[in-house]
Image: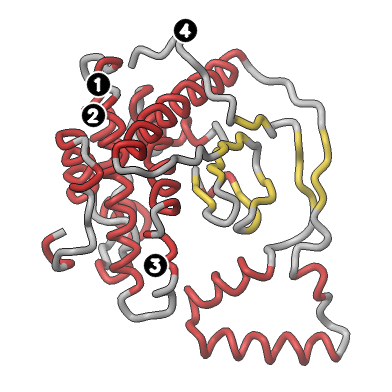
Amino acid sequence: MKWQGRRQSGNVEDARGKRMSGGGLPLAGIIQAVLRLLGPKGLIALVAVGIIGWQMGLIDPASLLGGGGQVTDVEYQSSAEEERLLQFVAVVLADTEDVWTAEFQRIGRQYREPELVIYKSRYPTGCGTGDARMGPFYCPADQKIYIDLSFYDSLEQEFSAPGDFAQAYVIAHEVGHHVQTLLGISEKVAARRGQPDYNEYSVRLELQADFLAGLWAHHNRHYLEKGDIEEAMRAANQIGDDAIQSRTQGKITPHAFTHGTSEQRMRWFMSGQESGRLEDSDTFDMPYEKL
């Protein structure tokens, strides 16, 4: 990918020199996690246990609500490779700003640019405590993207998906979630949380974000080099739900899918790359089996 010497986004926050200590998840994060794992009845049971524990003096509510978490400045020495990656990420984010500003103007909307926060290990977000082990993620509550640059080492070594365009695809996918938030799509999917078909809607949301990443690649094709699309496809193939489940648990459980299979993720990325049109991104108006 041709990226050196090009415009870098001003929406990148370098938080690598900040460290978070103590604290827990915000209340919203706790509720969402429990609902996902245990459902409404499990949440009610947990609240009852929490009240009893608080009355008996066994539980400190402040620690559960993240009140003890503090962010302090620390001395951070960045490597030359990290600085190169930071510049690369800023260029990719600038690319997405250009593409989505133009695409939103085409459909009569105004694009609001997201911020991208680069952090180390753990960092507070509007969606709870960001942890490097989670990989890159988008938080709709504060409309920011969070990434620990060490993820790119994992992408190359653990997922066997090297290459700068594979790295760019990851950012473009998260920006796709920002686009979904601006269009009101993410909110509609979040409203189904706790419903039996929530995972299916989560898969639809993720596959659409892959399409949107492909759309970005379509409009950025003049900066692509030979092999770039293959790098993105390799990354999509390695992070499909079936591929991850096969590696981590030795079996595939489709009902637990939240992002889609490797084949689906590659196909929807390529659909976006070939189309380049937001109107073709609808993953919701078709039977789940045909995704």
The percent position of residue 209, horizontal first and vertical second, equals 33, 48
Q: Which residue is mark 3?
A: 188
Q: Nearer the viewer, residue 140 or 252?
A: 140
* Label 3 element class: helix
**Point 28% across, 32% down: residue:** 232
Asked if the residues shown at circle 1 and circle 2 are in contact, with their CB atoms under 8 angstroms apart, the answer is yes
In the image, which disc is placed on residue 103?
none
Q: Is residue 186 left or right of residue 59?
A: left
From what the image shows, is residue 63 above or below residue 264?
below
In the image, which disc is placed on residue 221?
1
Identify the amino acid type marked 1: Arg
Mark closer to the chain start, 4 or 1: 4
Identify the amino acid type marked 2: His
**Marks 2/3: CA distance?**
27 Å
Asked if the residues shown at circle 3 and circle 4 are in contact, with their CB atoms under 8 angstroms apart, the answer is no
Q: Which residue is mark 2?
A: 218
Q: Is residue 124 left or right of residue 229?
A: right
Q: Is residue 238 visible?
A: no
